[in-house]
Image (cartoon, grey):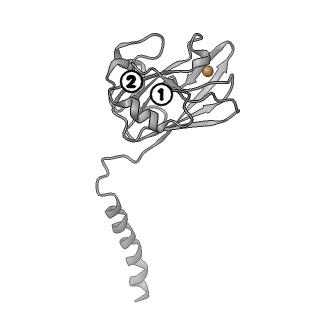
Amino acid sequence: MKRWTVVAFPLFTLGAAALVRPDDRTPPPATHRVRMLQQGNQYKFDPAGLRIQPGDVVEFVNVSGFPHNVQFYPNRIPAGAKDVLNRAMAQRMGDVAGPMMMQPNAVYRISFAGAPQGTYDYFCLPHLALGMKATLIVGQPGGPGSTINDGEPTPAQVPARSGR
Ligand SMILES: [Cu+2]
């Protein structure tokens, strides 16, 4: 009887785990990190090209050369993305514009839950003229951000899997 109990418990546990996630083709949300930094006289997002899956979270970390912010181009994000971003972005300065980050190692977190798939171009306002620009692809690239490019990575330059 004792031996039966020892064997049965792990089997039952495996069965329960399988029931919790019946469809394992849908990956759980992942959290990605993008560092905002200064290297010499260059200011950049690292990685400047990031591909995530719908529902994932991106954490922007204030590493050096700040203040930085995360600001999307309203005309270079997928249709329907503006309202989702405005809800997802805390302490905005304006439309799809994150706050100035002043503190070292501060983290600005954006959840892309409910965000449409496509190409999201963004920049750092204080360092826009210095080329601090980036591209985020949610799912598959698409929308105006895929065709308008002025210095940030093109969709073809964004690794298919990055930042996990
Ligand atoms: Cu910056």
Q: Which residue is mark 2?
A: 77
User: Which percent across, then down, holds residue 35?
Assistant: 59, 29
Quadrant in the rendering for residue 74: top left
Marks 1 & 2, CB-CB < 8 Å contact: yes
Q: Nearer the viewer, residue 143 or 5?
A: 143
Q: Secondary structure at mark 2?
A: loop
Residue extending furthest bottom?
A: 1
Q: Is residue 54 above or below residue 13?
A: above
* Drawn side of residue 110 relative to residue 139, left or right: right
Q: Nearer the viewer, residue 82 or 158?
A: 82
Distance in Å between CA atoms under marks 1 and 2: 10 Å
Does any atom of ligand 1 lie closer than 8 Å to the CB of label 2? Answer: no
Quadrant in the rendering for residue 92: top right
Residue found at x 33% / y 57%: 21
**Residue 150, numbered label:** none
Q: Is residue 55 above or below residue 6?
A: above
Q: Which residue is mark 1?
A: 96
